[in-house]
Amino acid sequence: MSFDLYSLQSHYGSTDVMVTLTTAKAPPKRKLVGTGIFINKIVRRKRNGSSSSSEQDGREEEEYEEEVEEVNQGGKQNKWACHRKVLLQKSPYFSSLLGKDFIESKASTVSLPGNILTAVSMENILKYMYTDTFDSTNSIKDIFDTYISADYLGMEELCNTLSKLMMTNIHQCTCYCSSCQVSIPTLFPLCRERATEHQDERMGLITEKMMIVLTNDPEKVLPTYWSNRHMAQLLMQMTQDVSQALIHKIIHRVNKFNAIETLFGCYTASNLLSVNDPLLSWSSALHATLTSVQSRATQKVAHNFDFFCSEYPALMSCIDDITYSFDFLEYLLLHILEDQMEFSNAGILYQGIACDLSGRDSVQSNDQVRDILSVAKVIILHYIGRNIDNMRQEGALDKLNEEVLMLLAQDLGVRPKSLISSRHPLSKRGIFSFLIPPIPDLSTSTSEYTNGLSRSSSRPVPSSSRGNTLSNHLKHNKPSIKHRFIRLFKRIMSYNPHVSSSVSIPSKKLPNRYLSTSTARTTASASSAWSQILLDHKNKVQTGITFSQKKKKTVRRMNSSPIVSINRRVRLIRRPNLTVGTVSYVGNVDFAKGIWIGVELDRRVGKNDGSVDGHRYFTTSINRGIFVRPDDVSIVI
């Protein structure tokens, strides 16, 4: 023991009772009649003065003296010689057990269940009984065990002290330090079990606070609690419903206003896990959690990309290299474009990257970030070019303004009118309504009309100024006006949209791009993979192709979707490095609409093992499975 009971004999006298721990399982508890105290339901003999012989009393005294001598000699510490007076005074349990109504009141030995009280906790309790102090240097597990023992013995004051000490050791559940990263995952299952099975209110409050700190702030908890071995052990130790409840709570904390910060937490946690557990020996559950949180965050960013590009400062700080690095910007854009780009947000993603972000001053002076945005722009153009017919039918690009539509049409090498649906107001105008300036009313002066025609034919103008069509003006028999319009018409016919186009879709497919997942460290820098994609793309641009030829090639690409079946070898066309695999699933999924393809990759660069959100579609090893859309793969011949 950490203190000497026998040094207190001068104050309390000689010890007169031996407390032992037994290996027998503790029986159910019951309340004493007339009291609120729980005691063990032990069958006791009624006191009978004539039932004990002097011989038996003598033997009991000899056994007690032998036990005291064994304790004094430093024997096994599961027996403690104590003072009956101290036990009666400090513990309601001992007060009831050693009372006058039970035979144990004269017994020399009291047995306690060893499956509830441990040797360490019993030593701590006896020290508290004799000194009214508790050693705060005990481990968090020993403090909890002592709390269980004190609650069993009915010592409410000590229980309150220990519960406060537990909160102090975990820094009131407001900290993300290395000590809390160990203590909270260790204490959480113990407190939760105590709260649910024994209706312990103190442990219930501590459990609730620990759950808050584990799930409240994704940016802080992901690279701390959710990237260490203790949290992985917690997820494996708890039942599936409890683990899923923790994961769902942190996923639901992701919203529009913390999505960028959450993605940075996923990025940091992924890098830490790839260093601490490169072989995925214990971090599989953590990787799965990071993948789910990352999917939620990228969805929020993709669906509100215009907000992040113009109003929210976090994304703009990535561009300006203030808060986050360019490597994180690469990670962010790649996962958004691969996981979340669809018909409804492709136009907004293009507008944000090509207009809002690329136009910042810091982009023009930094080659690395300019290359990242340029490759992201090429990926978006490639996606829109393959799906332009379906997007036009759904009106996916109708929300873009005329300036953005004009720029997008130039980059794609198509007519602006081919980007919008028949419901769009601009679709009712002439074939060159995007290119020619409005023809004013002939009642205006000749100088005003000449000034109007002298404007650049490629400059977009407000829709309110396009009031008249070609036929409305040619009906006026004014040769000078007609001749001028014919000259303008010829100049428009010779217009080449590729002269001012900064990026156009290459005639051949882009090389596959490698996307770092949340279950592998993002090590590719923007100056390597991204720059290589941009260089390859620039080398493939053919400036001599006419407008009609590019339109035919675009339509040909859109109609060349591969027919994929099970066991076919395919290549992911949206990754810079060669990434191939075998088709293991084709069909509908629960996590998104439409037909998806499950691919078992040859290398461990995927995102799952064939299951998503607990639903299994096919079986493979960890991080070798991935789900893609049919137009994101090409058949390997």
Image: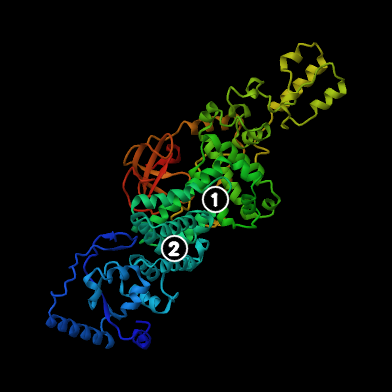
| Distance in Å between CA atoms under marks 2 and 1 | 31 Å
Res. 605 in view: no
Q: Earlier in the sequence, mark 2 or mark 1?
A: 2
Characterize the local packing of mark 2: few (<14), some (14-19) or many (20 or more) Cα atoms within 10 angstroms.
Answer: many
Left or right of 271? Residue 235 is: left
Which residue is at a point 37% across and 59% down the rendered structure image?
A: 189
Res. 555 in view: yes
Q: Nearer the viewer, residue 186 or 155?
A: 155
Above or below, 7 relative to 256: below
* Comparing labels 2 and 1, the label whose residue is closer to the camera: 2
Quadrant of res 48: bottom left
What colouring style does the render use?
A: rainbow
Left or right of 321? Residue 185 is: left
Quadrant of res 64: bottom left
Check contact, mark 2 vs mark 1: CB within 8 A: no
Q: Position of residue 217 (x, y in %)?
A: 53, 54
Q: Position of residue 190 (x, y in %)?
A: 37, 61
Pointer 2 residue: 184
| Badge number at residue 287 | none
Quadrant showing the N terminus: bottom left
Tally the marks: 2
Above or below, 197 relative to 141: above
Amino acid carrying mark 1 in the image: Leu
Name the secondary structure under disc 1.
helix
Amino acid carrying mark 2 in the image: Ile
Quadrant showing the C terminus: top left
Characterize the local packing of mark 1: few (<14), some (14-19) or many (20 or more) Cα atoms within 10 angstroms.
Answer: many
Q: Position of residue 119 (x, y in %)?
A: 31, 75
Above or below, 471 relative to 566: above
Pointer 1 residue: 332
Q: Nearer the viewer, residue 154 or 267?
A: 154
Name the secondary structure under disc 2.
helix
